[in-house]
Image: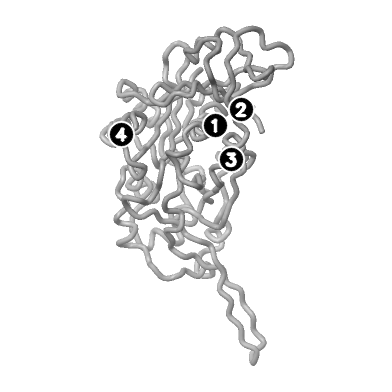
Amino acid sequence: MIVRPVRGSDLPALIELAHGAGAGTGLTTLPPNETRLAERVAAAEKAFRGEAERADADYLFVLESDSGKVVGISGIIAAVGQREPWYNYRVGLTVNASRELDIYREIPTLFLANDLTGNSELCSLFLRQDMRTGLNGRLLAKARLLFMAQYPELFGRRVMAEMRGMSDETGRSPFWESLGRHFFRMEFSQADYLTGVGNRAFIAELMPKFPLYTCFLSDAARAVIGRVHPESEPALAMLEAEGFSYQGYVDIFDAGPAVECETARIRAVRDSQVLILAVGTAGESAAPYLIHNRLREECRIVAAPARVAAGTLVVDPATAQRLRLYPGDQVRAVPLAG
């Protein structure tokens, strides 16, 4: 398996993956829309060539099997909100008190905010169900972090990821039903799809600008603010192990948490190192490493057993072949697990 930049020839496979993701997955940035996907692929190719400004750069990666089959996708948006507003709710607190009546109330509030503007965003992570084995999921998700380690100048000072919020088995979000539906008069899936295809203007046009008191929401809606969907708990745990944490920002549609980390403090970024590639037998002491060939447009990233020895990274011949490298070439590497 390798992770590499997306190509125009991958479009049919991406459309298949988007349809496979289906409704209710929380995968807003991978809608099953051929026009939108074609635009994203073209934008990604431009970004990898170094021809896009940070505000427009969209780095899209695919996971490819040894047989050449595209089985997964993941992405990084270099800077959110610099072409159109990026909205989240900031969870706050309003205190009301009356000494005369001996009343003291702390009421959680939601403020419509653009505070995460300029951050880089991890997005569009999806792996085909039958390929969710071995190291595949971690390779697809963490390869992006090693790419950022190699090219920190392309990304923001902070990185964030919006996690899927709570919904039932039919995709019904209690937060949306209690809040968003009253302003948008559409199904949650439709609003989610519109943002995925780049139509965010309606958020500013229809969403209230004043703080919202959560006491006016249903019990079910209040209970899911800042909670992640059970299916996304493994992804959240992986990000937390890399240094990401919840800082009080939630999605305006399903109230799923946004987690953040300073780019330089992400474990895979902080602990990665440039080493000389050596080909041989990794041995019993080998551990799974994330390994990047240090290229941009021809980027290739793998996860494989390796060991560090005297400034070299020893890998087996198959790993070197997947990277398209030879002994003596440089690689950037980091242990796969923190």
Figure quadrant of residue 30? top left
| Mark sitting earlier along the chain (2/3) | 3
Task: Specify the amino acid type for callout 4.
Answer: Glu
Q: Which residue is mark 2?
A: 334
Dot 1 falls on a residue whose secondary structure is helix
Q: Nearer the viewer, mark 4 or mark 3?
A: 4
Question: How far apart, in angstroms, are the residues tagged by discs 4 and 2?
Answer: 28 Å
Please name whichever residue, 111 or 83, is drawn nearer the observer in this view of the structure.
83
Q: Which residue is mark 4?
A: 51
Please name whichever residue, 150 or 146, is drawn nearer the observer in this view of the structure.
150
Figure quadrant of residue 96? bottom right
Q: Are marks 1 and 4 in contact (CB under 8 Å)?
A: no
Which residue in the rendered view is the most extreme toward the right? 284
Q: Which residue is mark 3?
A: 266
Number of other residues with Cα within 10 Å of mark 4, as a class: few under 14, some 14 to 19, many 20 or more:
few
Task: Specify the amino acid type for callout 1.
Answer: Lys
Task: Examine the rendered structure and indicate whether residue 3 appears above or below residue 98.
Answer: above
Residue 50 in picture, x, y percent from top left:
34, 32
Q: Nearer the viewer, mark 1 or mark 4?
A: 4
Question: How far apart, in angstroms, are the residues tagged by discs 1 and 3?
Answer: 11 Å
Q: Are marks 1 and 3 in contact (CB under 8 Å)?
A: no
Number of callouts in the render?
4
Residue 252 in picture, x, y percent from top left:
44, 56
Which residue in the rendered view is the most extreme toward the bottom? 100
Question: How far apart, in angstroms, are the residues tagged by discs 2 and 3?
Answer: 12 Å
| Mark sitting earlier along the chain (4/3) | 4
